[in-house]
Image (cartoon, rainbow, N blue to C red):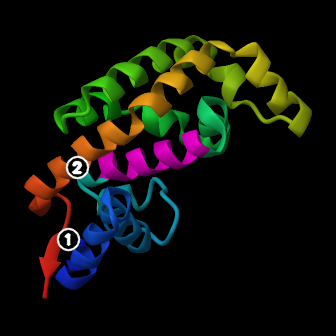
Amino acid sequence: MIQIKDSTLTAASQKGMDEFLQVFTDAYLEAIGGTLTAENMSLLNGSQHTLLAHRFFQDEMRDGGFVQLIQNGYGGYIFGNPFAKAIKQFGAVELSKLIYRAKEIYDPNKATLEREMNYEEFNALYVEFEAFDDLEEIYFDIEEQQTALIAAYVDEHIADFAEIIV
């Protein structure tokens, strides 16, 4: 089980919900050696994977949206797993709906979106997949509220996410 010091968690929670959640995901990344692989996936439980997927999703969306998220290799982790269903169970219903809508674009275009490409081809994907633009706008409108719901869920079900130690 992933262990987190109570003092670390308390200090982070006083800074904000993003910092609170990051304490968990930082611990997960440390436990898996910094990179998620087929070999280390079993080190995390379903709730932990959902929270880690949320971090990857949030980071990639802030940096470059759905195209970047997919090009950086997270398409399968977000859309090929029950992330949207799990995040809904965490209370983030609007985020879940958004992910399902993005999955409708991703699934039939997976090969195009995930293929190796140069920088110019990558940038061209933003034009080719303008359908993601509206979803990205929605995401930024709901991000703070949905993250607050996720943080509240984690706080209420903390034993599912880590063992808190003194």
State the residue position of label 2.
Answer: 47
* Magenta-drawn stretch contains 76: no
The furthest residue to the bottom: 166
Residue type, mark 1 in image: Met
Left or right of residue 158, residue 115 in this image: right
Nearest to the observer: residue 107 or residue 8: 8
Q: Is residue 28 above or below residue 7?
A: above
Tell me the CA gap for discs 2 and 1: 12 Å
Q: Which residues are magenta?
A: 49-62
* C-beta proximity under 8 Å, tags 2 and 1: no
* Numbered mark located on residue 1 in the image: 1
Q: Is residue 69 above or below residue 41?
A: above
Nearest to the observer: residue 104 or residue 60: 60
Q: Is residue 157 above or below residue 116?
A: below
Q: Residue at x 8, y 54 (%)?
A: 156
Nearer mark to the viewer, of 2 and 1 = 2
* Magenta-drawn stretch contains 55: yes
Q: Is residue 105 above or below residue 122?
A: above
Q: Position of residue 117 (x, y in %)?
A: 83, 34
2 or 1: tag closer to the N-terminus: 1
Q: Is the N terminus in the top left, top right, bottom left or bottom right quadrant?
A: bottom left
Report helix, strand or loop for mark 2.
helix
Q: Position of residue 82 (x, y in %)?
A: 31, 31
Left or right of residue 18, residue 60 in this image: right
Residue type, mark 2 in image: Ser
